[in-house]
Amino acid sequence: MKVVLGKDLLAANENKAAKNRELFDQAGILVVNLISSPGSGKTTLLEKTARFLGGDLKMGAIVGDLYTDRDARRLSEAGMVTVQINTEGVCHLDAKMVARALQEMPMVSLDLLFIENVGNLVCPAAFDLGEHVKVAVLSVAEGTDKPAKYPGIFRESGAVVINKSDLLPYTDFNVKNCLDDLRGIKENMAIFITSAKTGEGIDQWCKWLRESKGNMI
Amino acid sequence: MKVVLGKDLLAANENKAAKNRELFDQAGILVVNLISSPGSGKTTLLEKTARFLGGDLKMGAIVGDLYTDRDARRLSEAGMVTVQINTEGVCHLDAKMVARALQEMPMVSLDLLFIENVGNLVCPAAFDLGEHVKVAVLSVAEGTDKPAKYPGIFRESGAVVINKSDLLPYTDFNVKNCLDDLRGIKENMAIFITSAKTGEGIDQWCKWLRESKGNMI
């Protein structure tokens, strides 16, 4: 019973996600679904991205949170058009929630749309939101072993951002081992080592976003 | 349909959890359910705990992981009796999984049993495993705003460990604001500031464990 309902729910989500993707393609927006543990620095990464690319590209963000609107307010201040989704305790965004948020999003005026998922490295991996690419964000403070321990999200992702590189000197994080594990899970993955705090690597990450947007046309 | 099934599942879990708790009480073991984001340092905290209290108390650990047995191996090496649960992608432990693991756990010979949950700050909060107390672990690298953004688990917890205090000088983490948020969510919560790396605060945490075990009798 549980499994059947699970499959039905996921199938309904796939249908809704396909409709979202059609809307994104019609509007010519590149849509990125950002997934990570709580506290990996997704919002700070997007703040920096807004400042780095804001002169050229119009950006929006749909921000998933259990209850608060802190992140959405921060991204508005950084110049993004934002729509907040409060999941009221639900551990992931689904395509229906995103479809509802899109009704408030002025899509034709955007180039890039970020979906900042609920902080959770497990559940959001199973839900297609209609995005063009999933990006997993990992903080070096979380430890080298995260790709090996939570392979699902890294397998689903087109890119990985290894964030908070400013903390590298103070942690046991082993960049080489982490990269090896990531390559073992999936080849041909774009990987960026960034510090949203100091700005390290933000240029490479933004270059990739710009090129990915360019490749859409 | 979804809600009804959800309630049935949670009710079945409560029944199973009550049976687990009966077994724990009969054996006179204090059982602690450790919940956190991936990479907060739960396993390293338990390694230090094993070394600090190992002379006095016999300890066991049931270790939940999506796929690997890395954490269980580390805790065995630190002297704990360990049983591994691989959830095969499921985002939390439930009482039935724990009941199955207990069949391999020599309970009568133990004083303390830790259940190290899957790294996830959201879903495990909803599942009673039969433990006597939930403990939320938060790394200072995750940021000050985590209690406000993920209040569910902190409301359910009898204690909070603020870990990786060795990183405090290199992060924006504001201890006072975090403590204020925690007190706002729940009064009378035991709070420990620790570094499982340097050993800071491990004595206070272990003193609380010893007293909590003493208060059972």
Image (cartoon, coloured by chain):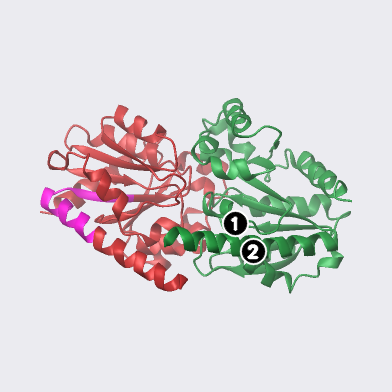
Chain colours: A red, B green
User: Residue at the location (58% across, 51% down)?
Assistant: B125
Crowd rating for badge 1 (residues with CA inside 10 Å; few <14, some 14–19, many 20+):
some
Q: Quadrant of residue B106?
A: bottom right
Instruction: Name the amino acid type tagged 2.
Output: Ala
B168 on left or right of B197: left
The one nearer the camera, A145 or B56, is B56
Q: Please report whichever mark, 1 or 2, sits nearer to the chain's N-terminal start.
A: 2
**Magenta segment includes A18:** yes
Instruction: Name the amino acid type tagged 1.
Output: Phe
Where are the magenta residues, as a range?
A17-33
Q: Is residue B19 above or below residue A1?
A: above
Q: Are marks 1 and 2 in contact (CB under 8 Å)?
A: yes
**Magenta segment includes A103:** no
Secondary structure mostly seen in the magenta stretch = helix
The one nearer the camera, B78 or B123, is B123
Q: Which mark is residue B127?
A: 1
Q: Position of residue A108 (x, y in %)?
A: 12, 42
Which residue was labeled with disc 2?
Answer: B95
- The residues tagged by marks 1 and 2 sit, at their Cα atoms, a distance apart of 7 Å
Query: Please, what secondary structure does the residue beneath circle 1 have?
Result: loop
